[in-house]
Amino acid sequence: MEQLGMLYEGKAKQVYLTDERDKVIIRYKDDATAFNNVKKAVIANKGVLNNRISAMIFGRLRDAGVENHYISTLGDRDQLCRRVEIIPLEVVVRNVIAGSMARRLGIEEGTIPPNVIYDICYKAEALGDPLVNDHHAVAMGIVTYDELRVIYDMADRINATLKALFASTGVTLVDFKIEFGRTEDGRIILADEISPDTCRLWDAETGEKLDKDRFRRDLGHVIEAYEEIYVRLSRVVGLAL
Ligand code: UDP
């Protein structure tokens, strides 16, 4: 496998082409951003931890029958993935009210709703990734209603698998963001990453935040929280490295 030129650089990752047209190398960086790029920092070793954590989670999801882009881990920061065309939607799944939903609707953070809540946001940085609904997404030609059904069904299965996985490590999966991509043959599969950058993870006993909110809210001990998630997951998931 030979690494070729960079295809794309995002806030936390770089994507490289390879000599196999259907595969890319994803490199996890230490850069952290929040509030639509207003707050920026380098968190030493974050990329290494997120590469490992995301690999463990995607491996577990594959075992649970959720098709995804992860193929193998190549090194500390690099993973080999299937090349997909990212669907420009951030799909957020919420088991506990927190963050933007708590703020927007005036609900106390930590409130447990009777149902699981699914948000979709249009990935468009210039617009601040606005919250949209199914009809908006279809009207913009981003997805069809049939594809949305597939996406929500996968999000549901991902949530069930990850809630159980994190619960077994003493962590509550409060909410998370996922992204999907289309393969060359038109299948929709899970892509991007799942890590403390993209999830809210609270210690089930103490409620301590073990995720990117430590960075967003200046709570300190950011990397220690990511390490804690890595260590806890490693105890229950076979190491992907
Ligand atoms: N999230 C993310 N990327 C984003 C926005 C949100 O990974 O660009 C994750 C975030 O970490 C949380 C969930 O999606 O786990 C819900 O975030 P929310 O909508 O509450 O937004 P926030 O409070 O992060 O602005």
Image: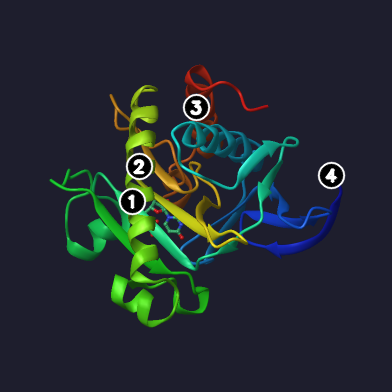
Estimate the spatial distance between the alpha carbons at disc 1 and disc 3, rounded to whole Å: 30 Å
Q: Which residue is mark 3?
A: 228
> Considering the numbered disc 2 on the image, is that residue within a helix, a strand or a loop?
helix
The label on residue 1 is 4
Tag 1–tag 4 contact (CB < 8 Å):
no
Q: Are marks 4 and 2 in contact (CB under 8 Å)?
A: no
Q: Residue at x 59, y 36 (%)?
A: 55
Query: What is the spatial separation of the Cα atoms under label 1 and label 4, in whole angstroms?
Result: 34 Å
Which quadrant of the figure shows ligand 1?
Answer: bottom left
- Label 1 C-beta lies within 8 Å of the nearest ligand 1 atom: no
For residue 153, the mark is 1
**Among numbered discs 3 and 4, the one appearing first in the sequence:** 4
Instruction: Determine which quarter of the picture holds residue 205.
Output: top left
* Relative to 179, 24 lies left or right: right
Task: Decide if residue 202 is in sight here.
Answer: yes
User: Disc 3 on helix, strand or loop?
Assistant: helix
Q: Amino acid at mark 4?
A: Met
Left or right: residue 30 versus residue 86 is: right
**Number of labelled discs?**
4
Looking at marks 1 and 3 on the same chain, the residue that comes earlier in the sequence is marked by 1
Cα distance in 3D space between marks 4 and 2:
32 Å
Asked if residue 133 shows in the view, the reply is no
At x 49%, y 67%, the residue is 36
> Does the CB distance between marks 2 and 1 fall below 8 Å?
yes
Residue linked to disc 2: 157
Q: Which mark is residue 15?
A: none
Mark 2 vs ligand 1: CB below 8 Å:
no
